[in-house]
Amino acid sequence: MKLRHILLAEDSPMDVELTLEALQEHHNITVTEDGEAALDYLYHRGVHANREPGNPDLILLDLKLPKLNGLQVLEQIKKCDLLRTIPVVVLTSSKEQSDLKTAYDLGANAYVVKPVVFEQFMDAVRQIGQFWAGLNEIPPAVPSARN
Amino acid sequence: MCRSPDLYSRSNVEFRQAGFLGLNLNSGMTWDDAPSGSDAHFVRLFRKASKFLAWSAILLTVLGLADWLSAYFWPNYHLLHGTAFPHHPLIPLLSVLVSGLVALSVQSHPQRTRWVQAGIGACLFGIGIVAEVPFIGNQLGLRGFSEWVTLLLGFAIGAGASRMTLIGYVRQLSLFVLFFLSGLIVIEHIFETAATSSHMLEYVRTPWTIAFSNLLVGHALLFQHPNFGIMRLVSGNGVGCHIMRRLLPSVILLLIFFGWLLAYGGAKSWYPSSFGEALYAILSAAGFTGILLFTAASLNRLDDERRERERELRRSQNQLQSVLDNIPSIICIKDPAGRYLMVNATFVEVTGFSPETSMGKTVHDPLPEVTSQVVDRGYNQAFIMGGPVHSVEVIPQPSGFRTYLTAHFPLLNSEGEAYAACGVYTDITDLKRQEEEIQRLNLSLQEKTIRQEAANHELEAFSYSVSHDLRAPLRHIAGFGQLLAQRNRDKLDEKSLHYLDVIQTSVTRMGMLIDDLLSFSRASKVELSPKRIDTAELVAEVRAELEAQHSGNAIRWEIGTLPGIQGDPAMIRLVWVNLLSNAIKYSSKNPHPHITIAYGPAEDESGAFWVRDNGAGFDMRYADKLFEVFQRLHSNQEYEGTGIGLAMVRRILERHGGRIWAKSAPGEGAYFYFVLPAAFPPGTTTTAEGDRA
């Protein structure tokens, strides 16, 4: 199976480690530690100015991110014509109804609360990867966003 | 306490007295401007009579002139008089004519004719004087009785233009002199028809036409001002005026008639003169007696009417006084000089002064200086403004400062002048205090609300933080513990694996606690949006959901008729989820779990929902602890749980205005009852609205 490209925006190194544990076998994963870095990556800015062209197949987005938070990043992505087709799965600890509602209002494709129990967590992340970065099809020929 | 109105209120007699007899010497007023005391009906009648008399005088004068002319040209033909005019009648006739016209025009245009009136009056007066100067009068053959009358008419007309009261009285006097003179001639003429000759007529040489028309025009001039002077005695509405109107014309006419009868009977030799005189005397006595009887009867009738009116007045005064006395406000009426005319019982109560001691006194007498200044200001403003003045005053009292809502308004007489002012003082000290207290409470409530809102906000931030941040490390502990176990499964001994297992269990339990705590805090603070809920449907849904997760012995469910309720669907759902999952959990060790759900009377409540299970039950000694946060009656080994479910149920029900209680005994199952104030009686069709989240 072709390695699909996932952008993981997550500030907690431990969560990153656990997520990578679940996903890295089958996916090519880029990690950004804050909201701004995530957008920089998508827009080929800053340290990511010279990255390979092409959008990720999936964005896993934590809500509690330094600098720009997850919801702000989500808003930017879904407002941008070149990025909005990328599936964004919010992967967060927050069970708050307000977060859930805002995320969907802003156009999140899925909202998953990180399970506390390890097996459930691994299972959930794997399933996300399988579905969104495996089974799910997105429109082709989306030019890479540059600004 | 004596509440006789006579004691409390000095009647306004003194105000009426100002208009007594109409002898108002206030020179600023015109004669006709003072109608008080006069009867409007009679005033109108006299004005009409004045016009009628003026027209009659003019007509008679024209006839007199025609007669004089006819006698002049045709000495043997006489229109009115048996004999020719003994002297030149032109001046008296013309003076009557002019006077009649003046009487008419003055009534139509009182202001415009003032100077004309004065001029004409002066002319006639002048002619009268000139005619009476012996030398000139004798030369012209004018000097006689009629010229005196012309002089009087001239004065009456001229004086009519003046606004001075004194001149008005002299004018009326001059007219009475005129009536005396002219009346004498007229009566003499009437008697002449009876007597053969009259020396008197020989002397005055005045024809009856002139005398009679003088009489008519004199009355026309007198009746011009029915409100003034002596006329008020006739046109007024007093008893004296009533007598005047009845007695005066009848006495005059009766005396003339009897006098004529005496003369006529004597001339015709119907009876000897002594009998005639006796007849005159007895007829006069009888006539007067009749008139007096008639007048007395009519006066008595008037008196009865007046007494009835007085009774009415007293009744309404009593009514008014008892209303005034029972009003909890101070009410007092004062004249412009500041003297009390009326005070009510509250005034007496507050000031401690009796009506007798305060009546007629000024405000400074019964009240202390500071108070009276405030009170005076209110009354003065009412007099100045001429209308009601409202204010709030703080007035010192022996008991301390009191706040009064005051209203002062002038009391007007029929002329629209303020003769007194009324002050109403309502003590609003207590109201004011209460208002201040309410304001203070409101303010502190607002402060509390702000603090509460801030606390709520903090709590929200806190619970968000708990939700997000507490879970993350737990996940890490669990995750890395598990990774550790996977990695070293072969190297770890059984004990180490057990430790890792304990870590996993604790983490899971911690996660549950966090979730339940968050649910509890949400149930406490989330805004309720009440909708109509079909309880039966909701219970069926919850039961199906819980049964799907249940893996123990098959449960026997018994569900009665459940009424619909009004409540927040998500919250009420939590109530049922917790109660039913509790029932399932605690009866799970019974080989035949049996859960009953019903609605019916319980304890003091006419209708309560209840859930019964045949599970472990509990000791009623600990019933209080049941609904408190983190309080459990069973160990976690026995029955898993966080100790939050029932606390949350109670919180939700309380927020809906309801309550929950439980009954049980160890090993005998448990009853959980709850009531909601918005419960509808069973059988009510309910329509489920909104989502069933």
Image (cartoon, coloured by chain):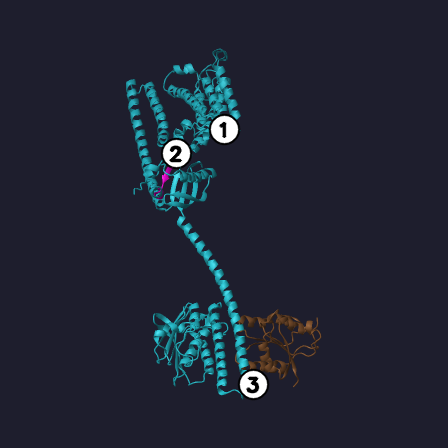
Chain colours: A brown, B cyan
Q: Chain of mark 1?
A: B
Residue highlighted by disc 3: B487
- Front: mark 2 or 1: 2
In depth, the one of B440 and B409 nearer the eye is B440
Q: Residues within 10 Å of mark 2 (few under 14, many from 20)?
A: few
| Helix, strand or loop status at disc 2 | helix
Residue highlighted by disc 2: B15
The numbered mark, 2 or 3, whose residue comes first in the sequence reads: 2
Residue furthest to the bottom in view is B490
Vertical order, B114 against B267 (above or below): below
Where does the magenta region start and end? B336-347
Residue highlighted by disc 1: B106
The residue type indicated by label 2 comes to Phe
- Front: mark 3 or 1: 3
The residue type indicated by label 3 comes to Arg
- Front: mark 2 or 3: 3
Q: Give the CA separation, mark 3 to mark 1.
A: 135 Å
Vertical order, B132 against B487 (above or below): above
Q: Chain of mark 3?
A: B
Q: Residues within 10 Å of mark 1 (few under 14, many from 20)?
A: many
Image point (31%, 24%), residue name: B284
Asked if both marks, 2 and 3, belong to the same chain, the answer given is yes
Residue B333 relative to residue B545: left or right: left
